[in-house]
Image (tube, coloured by chain):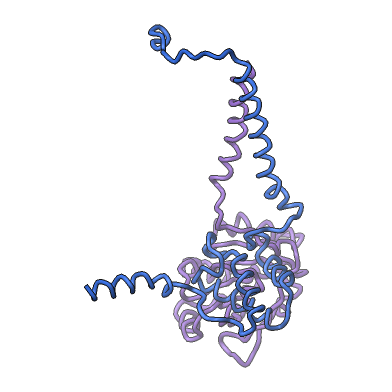
Amino acid sequence: MKKLLLVIALLAASPLLFAIDTGKAFDDPVLQARYETIISEVRCLKCQNQTIKDSNAFLAGDLRREIRRMLAEGKTDDEIYDFLVVRYGEFALYRPRMSGKTLILWIAPGLFILLGGIVAIRVVRKRMSMPIDDDDEIEPNQAAS
Amino acid sequence: MMRYLAPLVVFAIMIPVFMVGLKRDPTMLPSPFLDKPAPEFELPKLKDLSQTVSNKDYAGQVALVNVWATWCVGCRQEHEFLIRLSQENPLPIYGLNWRDRREDGLAWLQQLGDPYVASGYDADGRAGIDWGVYGAPETFLISKDGRVLYKHLGPLNRVIWEREFVPKIAADHGATP
């Protein structure tokens, strides 16, 4: 029983072992917080559905190292994001910044909600104006058609 | 009539959109440097760390910058073509030995031949980041005035060379190379 408990406890702890970016990069909690925010906003270009915080690709490691360096040098968040966008394009950011090229990404969701809403309202209005028919039974000749 | 036609029209619009989407490879990212000045670099030479190789070495020439590493399978695939290309010598080829062990890189060039005028040794990947490299092999075509004319991702071969590089080189020269 004790062994079983030990195994369960170890299994439960295992996600911690798989954490990629472990340990503190900075003693200063403010810098550390900024660091963690930035690395969870940046896409790992090699493994595109992961942030560089989650990825163990060496490119992600290199980018984390560069970000640590820039933070230590006193660069602002915007300067760091610029550094990445200049080299890798807007795609490197999970939240691409608003610009002519990325505008469609930002307005598309709103546009789709608007369009869907208009369609939904029209359908509902139409249904409301239809005569109410409480007869749920399907007439034999209808079912056959 | 309209209520039957509308979904059909929407569907007809969606088909080409998704067709294009299906055929695009999301791992092939366009370089933000296209038609812009290529990044600068200065690195120790792989073969002689006491010397450096930099973008100034090919200033004023159309040149190829090829990112390679010995752990990279695609680099192995394209190596033979690079050797041939260096023999035909239409332009100087510079290497960026990216995140590699130096002895491995040297052994590779020894065994397979060295198509490069020089290879910069980028052990920690810093130069690679400056070039927006995210996976080797990557090949940059640099114009005479130092702009990135084209970036190819993945192994290079004759077909891609003839189709993508040759016309761009010719255009930059203003004549056939």
Name chain A's colour: blue
Q: Nearer the viewer, residue B126 or A135?
A: A135
Residue B149 higher or lower than B11, as above or below: below
Locate the N terminus of chain A and report the quarter of the image it occupies. bottom left
| Residue furthest top as drawn | A141
Name chain B's colour: purple
Residue B89 visible, this angle: no
Q: What is the x, y in percent for residue A128?
A: 61, 20
Q: What is the x, y in percent for residue B15?
A: 57, 35
Locate the C terminus of chain A and report the quarter of the image it occupies. top left
Residue A12 visible, this angle: yes
| Residue furthest left as drawn | A1
Q: Nearer the viewer, residue B127 or B7?
A: B7
Determine the image quadrant of residue B118: bottom right
Determine the image quadrant of residue A14: bottom left
Q: What is the x, y in percent for residue A30?
A: 66, 78
Residue B30 higher or lower than B105, as above or below: above
Name the side, left or right, on which B171 lies relative to B72.
right
| Residue furthest bottom as drawn | B50
Residue B100 higher or lower than B19, as above or below: below
Q: Nearer the viewer, residue A112 or B155?
A: A112
**Residue depicted at 59% across the width and 80% down the height:** B119
